[in-house]
Amino acid sequence: MEALHKFGFANQPTSNSVDDGLKLRDAYMTAVVRCAPPKNKPSVREIETCKFYWTEEIGLLAQIRVVLALGRIAFDTYVKWLRDAEEDVATLKFRHGAFYHFSSPRPALAASYHPSRQNTQTGRLTKQMLESVLVQIQEYLRSSNPI
């Protein structure tokens, strides 16, 4: 939330409960899976079971211009969805800071390591690294025309 707030996507830097006043601006969060799987590693079956929910949400967001995949599971799942929609995804590779553009109506895809404690406490993902991805997203949103 702190990074989203810094870049104008949230009205406050923290969120501790559903009724704490957090409001997102030009941003929406969803998850590939709806439960906390064992060891935080969802199975293919869990991802497929929950696919309906996040794909429905994406379909309802008419103005979506960028998807930020937080972690490889989110990235791979979204890429599979693009492949199923017959988008050419052969060259898409997960790496922190990767940014991919598609033809309309497909939103661009930005990739980041997941901001889990395991990644942030070990330094795999730093505050500056996450902010660099948000800078890319802001620059893209400023330079592209709305759908």
Image (cartoon, helix red, strand yellow):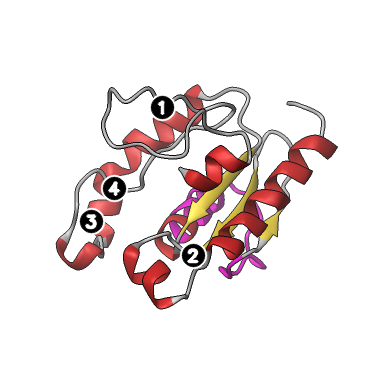
Q: Is residue 48 left or right of residue 127?
A: left
> How far apart are labels 4 and 2 at the CA level?
17 Å
| Quadrant location, the N terminus | top left
Label 1 or label 3, whichever lies nearer to me, is 1
In the rendered image of this protein, does residue 9 appear above or below residue 132? above
Q: Secondary structure at mark 2?
A: loop
* Residue type highlighted by circle 1: Leu
In the image, 25: left or right of 44?
right
Q: Which residue is mark 2?
A: 113
Q: Earlier in the sequence, mark 2 or mark 3?
A: 3
Residue of label 4: 33
Judge whether residue 2 can be spotted in this image.
yes
Instruction: Give how far apart the Cα atoms at labels 1 and 4 are.
Output: 22 Å
Helix, strand or loop at label 1? It is loop
Q: Nearer the viewer, mark 4 or mark 2?
A: 2
The tag earlier along the polypeptide, 1 or 3, is 1
Residue positioned 61% across, 31% down in the render: 64
- Identify the amino acid type marked 3: Arg
In the rendering, at what x and y percent does residue 63 appear? 63, 24
User: What residue does disc 3 label?
Assistant: 45
Q: Which residues are magenta?
A: 76-96
Residue at 68%, 33% in the rendered image? 105
Q: Nearer the viewer, mark 2 or mark 1?
A: 1
The foreground one among 60 and 15 is: 15
Q: CA distance from mark 4 to mark 3?
A: 10 Å
Pointer 1 or 4: first along the chain: 1
Picture disc at residue 22: 1
